[in-house]
Amino acid sequence: MNQLLVELRQAGQKPDRVLLDRIRSYGQDAVRPLIEMAIDEKLHNADSKSPEVWAPLHAIQLLGELGDSEAIEPLLPLFDRVDDDYLAQTLPEVFGGIGAPAVGPLRALLFDRTKDVFARARAAESLSKIGQRHHETRSDVVNALVARLDPVESQSPKDEILNGFIIAELLHMKAVEAATAIRQAFAEDRVDTSIVDLDHALEELGLSPGSPRAVKERGLRLRLRCTGCGYEREHYVETVYCDLATQERRGKGEPTPYSEFIIPQRITCPKCGAVDQYQLSSLAYITLMAEVLKKRMAHELGRPGDGPEEGALRFIRFGLSDGREMHPLAAREMYRQRVEGEPNRADLRVCYANVLRFLGHIEEATEQYREALRLEPANLEAYLNLGRFAQDDGDIAEAVRMFQSILMKAPSSGLPRKTRESYVEAAAEVLADLAGPPERSGALQLPPRLPSREDLGTRQPGPAAMAQPIRVTRKVGRNDPCPCGSGKKYKKCHGR
């Protein structure tokens, strides 16, 4: 027996089945020596290239084949080695072989909040293996897993992760009897849907889906982690900008306090209500990197309409009107401080509002534009953007009032003639559209959005640019590296 164990220590990753069967033939006499090998820390921590490092796994496998309950308690601490992928695969199979005597200890581990969530997930998988291989235990196993889905057990983000794994194991068992508990967990928002979602769960159980299939959206669904409560939730975002300047600084090893990815809309946590307090989860980052690869592949395949400035993910540079490149969140903080220091400057409030507008903070931007008009009643840019907001909201009367104000206030605005003409021309065009024929339904036809200030600045360079506090340079330099990551110059890649 001892000689066989010596051979097992030197057998490496794939021992001869004959050797394993010879050890197994010793039956009960092999259990204690195999347990000692299975929990030997020196073997677990041996050099990854040595044959000895595989010996504990082979010993564990044999204990599962022998099915002796004596191995249960010694093997349970191995669940704590959550970074060992081989153990993650082996332990559930082993406990599945041991069967009914392991149900109680595994249930205790499943409910033990002092243990790592992935150790507890392995306990759930082990219970599932037992339930599938030992039919007399099925009821006890399903009851244990369902009990862990009880609402009182959901107290933290990690509980949602564990609930996801538990539901996955119930699906492996085809536990239709657990459908009510599964539905309730999803209805009460207690499941990490990156692991399993309700429609998939119901489909696996042969039940009708919980809701109609959603129509494919044009934007992206990103899992974002709330920094307020720690929970992750999926959010729909129409557009994500990638700030090239931040990306370049990060590539040079320079400090970058803000992410290169900017989501220009309010993000509200459905759990705690925190607003714009989030981080990209690892899945969200993978999603965005996949979008970068899609752009590269689309270009290589010659597909039009998916350049750096198109699609849900867009490459862009942010900067101020004086030419300085600045992250929009840094610009927001800078203008906030400047407005606090000089609250009676209408131009600063418009600058601040423009940054807020870009970031999707419409209510705050509206407040700043209105305050700018209180300080400077002929500020055409404030009227222009308030008119745009009214258009977006479908408030035709308010939009008309704002654009008419541009026509009335332009002569006293103090702006250069060409700049005034740009505002007047744009406002008159929108007013003409607003007065056009109504739809068949009787409602006024909503006109196209008023051209942005960036567009006005392009048509009227020079003085018009002075009124624009944030410059969004949408064109990448032709000799710059292409933002898609191909390694080619822009002019030889997406810029062709």
Image (cartoon, rainbow, N blue to C red):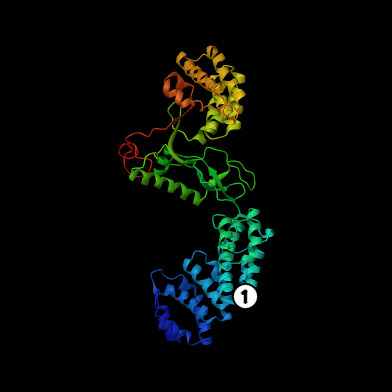
**Quadrant in which the C terminus is drawn:** top left
- Given residues 454 and 471, the one toward you in this image is 454
Q: Is residue 124 above or below residue 347?
A: below
Q: Is residue 282 above or below residue 317?
A: below
Q: Is residue 68 above or below residue 291?
A: below
Residue 428, given in percent of the width and then of the height, sits at 52, 18
- Given residues 371 and 143, the one toward you in this image is 143
Q: Which residue is labeled 1 in the image?
A: 137
Give the number of marks: 1
**Quadrant in which the N terminus is drawn:** bottom left
Label 1 sits on a secondary structure element that is helix
Q: Residues within 10 Å of mark 1 (few under 14, many from 20)?
A: some
Q: Is residue 447 left or right of residue 323?
A: right
Amino acid carrying mark 1 in the image: Thr
Quadrant for residue 47, please give it.
bottom left
Query: At 42% from the left edge and 78% from the top edge, which residue is drawn?
Result: 9
Quadrant for residue 136, please give it.
bottom right
Task: Tell which residue pokes out farthest to the right in this image.
Answer: 152
- Given residues 418 and 253, the one toward you in this image is 418
Q: Is residue 173 visible?
A: yes
Task: Tell which residue pokes out farthest to the left in this image.
Answer: 492
Task: Tell which residue pokes out farthest to the top in this image.
Answer: 411
Q: Is residue 216 above or below residue 185?
A: above
Q: Is residue 471 left or right of residue 122?
A: left
Residue 166, given in percent of the width and then of the height, sits at 59, 63
Residue 39, given in percent of the width and then of the height, sits at 51, 75
Query: At 62% from the left edge and 58% from the top edge, which residue is drawn?
Result: 159
